């Protein structure tokens, strides 16, 4: 009996220990799961509704409620100018919808820089900044960078011609001078679509310029030849003071002007005298010169 009692006691202790061990493991797993859920909740990013394109849009396509959709967007990573309100995107009373100015891909946020205001046409006038004017420049395959210009590119404008007569009446040779730096193109011929990738041999390009720059370009175009130089995409450098003539191009230096030697003759000091006759004798007396 005593042996059976000990056996039952040992068996009970073992079962109790196993139960405690299993319960401890279950509780540990449960606590770990709770910690993972808390960490996941801490990583949840706040979002807001942002209106994006439901389909790909190209230059000139109308933007209507049928081709936009609201999606969740991280609140801490909103692009500048996004639309979070449908009424702001499509205001009441607008006779015509907005129009795409650039390519907008599917699910890309709608931004003001890529579309017109409600009712505006997607023409050149909608691309002009405040205080700017559109001016057309005649180009050919050489002066127009071999047809690789596109709307939205920036160019430097060089003038080549003969300057007016110099002050001495001497006419110098032709010069090339930079007259406009980092000027933005808004159209190539009649094409204002900046997403056009194929080269175009243009006859004219339209640039965005201030009224003063327009006057300079008009004067330069009527008195000489204009050439365009394409500026790099991320190059914001504004260059000035570039001018070169034929002599500088060929490395010819002007000969120094001859210097005339002037002989300075030694002059004797002026002597003033007075003559006095004493009988038959004439006496010459030096006196101070008064003049």
Image (tube, rainbow, N blue to C red):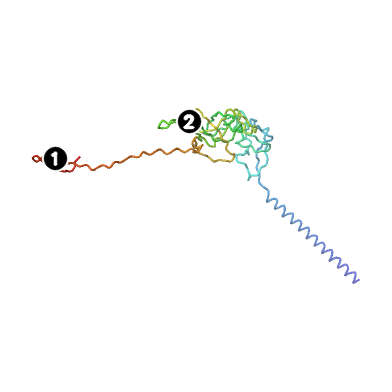
> From the viewer's perspective, is 267 left or right of 158?
left
Q: Is residue 273 visible?
A: yes
Q: Is residue 93 visible?
A: no
Please tell me which residue lies in front, 213 or 39: 213
Q: Quadrant location of residue 102? A: top right
Taking the view exactly as shown, the residue that stands out farthest to the bottom is 2
Residue 74 percent across, percent down from the top left: 65, 44
Residue 143 percent across, percent down from the top left: 57, 31
Q: Quadrant location of residue 71? A: top right
Taking the view exactly as shown, the residue that stands out farthest to the left is 279
> From the viewer's perspective, is 80 left or right of 279?
right
Residue 263, numbered circle: none
Please tell me which residue lies in front, 250 or 216: 250
Taking the view exactly as shown, the residue that stands out farthest to the right is 1
Q: Residue at x 48, y 30 (%)?
A: 162
Residue 151 percent across, percent down from the top left: 60, 33
Evaluate if marks 2 and 1 touch, with contact meaning CB atoms under 8 Å apart: no
Q: Sequence-wise, which precedes: disc 2 or disc 1?
A: 2
Between label 2 and label 1, give the one nearer the viewer.
1
Q: Secondary structure at mark 2?
A: loop
- CA gap between label 2 and label 1 equals 72 Å
Residue 93 percent across, percent down from the top left: 60, 30
Q: Residues within 10 Å of mark 2 (few under 14, many from 20)?
A: some
Q: Quadrant location of residue 22? A: bottom right
Quadrant for the N terminus in the image: bottom right
Residue 275, numbered circle: 1
- Residue, disc 2: 162
> From the viewer's perspective, is 88 left or right of 133?
right
């Amino acid at each position: 009996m005593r042996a059976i009692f000990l056996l039952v006691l040992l068996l009970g202790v073992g079962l109790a220990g196993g139960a405690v061990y299993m319960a401890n493991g279950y509780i540990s797993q449960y606590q770990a799961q709770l910690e993972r859920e808390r960490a996941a909740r801490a990583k949840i990013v706040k979002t807001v509704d942002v209106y994006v394109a439901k389909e790909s849009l190209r230059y000139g396509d109308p933007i209507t409620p049928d081709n936009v959709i609201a999606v969740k967007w991280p609140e801490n990573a909103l692009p500048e100018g996004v639309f979070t309100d449908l009424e702001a995107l499509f205001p009441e009373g607008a006779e015509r919808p907005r129009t795409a100015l650039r390519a907008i891909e599917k699910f890309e946020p709608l931004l003001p820089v890529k579309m017109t205001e409600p009712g505006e046409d997607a023409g050149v006038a909608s691309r002009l900044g405040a205080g700017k004017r559109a001016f057309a420049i005649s180009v050919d395959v050489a002066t127009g960078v071999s047809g690789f210009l596109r709307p939205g590119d920036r160019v430097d404008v060089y003038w080549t011609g003969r300057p007016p007569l110099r002050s001495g009446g001497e006419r110098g040779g032709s010069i090339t001078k930079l007259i406009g730096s980092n000027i933005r193109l808004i159209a190539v011929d009649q094409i204002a679509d900046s997403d056009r990738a194929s080269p175009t041999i243009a006859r004219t390009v339209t640039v965005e310029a201030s009224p003063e720059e327009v006057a300079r370009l008009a004067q330069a175009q009527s008195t000489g030849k204009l050439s365009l130089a394409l500026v790099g995409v991320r190059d914001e450098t504004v260059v000035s003071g570039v001018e070169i003539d034929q002599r500088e191009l060929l490395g010819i230096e002007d000969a120094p002007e001859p210097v005339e030697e002037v002989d300075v003759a030694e002059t004797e000091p002026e002597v003033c005298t007075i003559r006095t006759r004493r009988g038959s004798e004439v006496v010459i007396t030096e006196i101070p010169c008064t003049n």
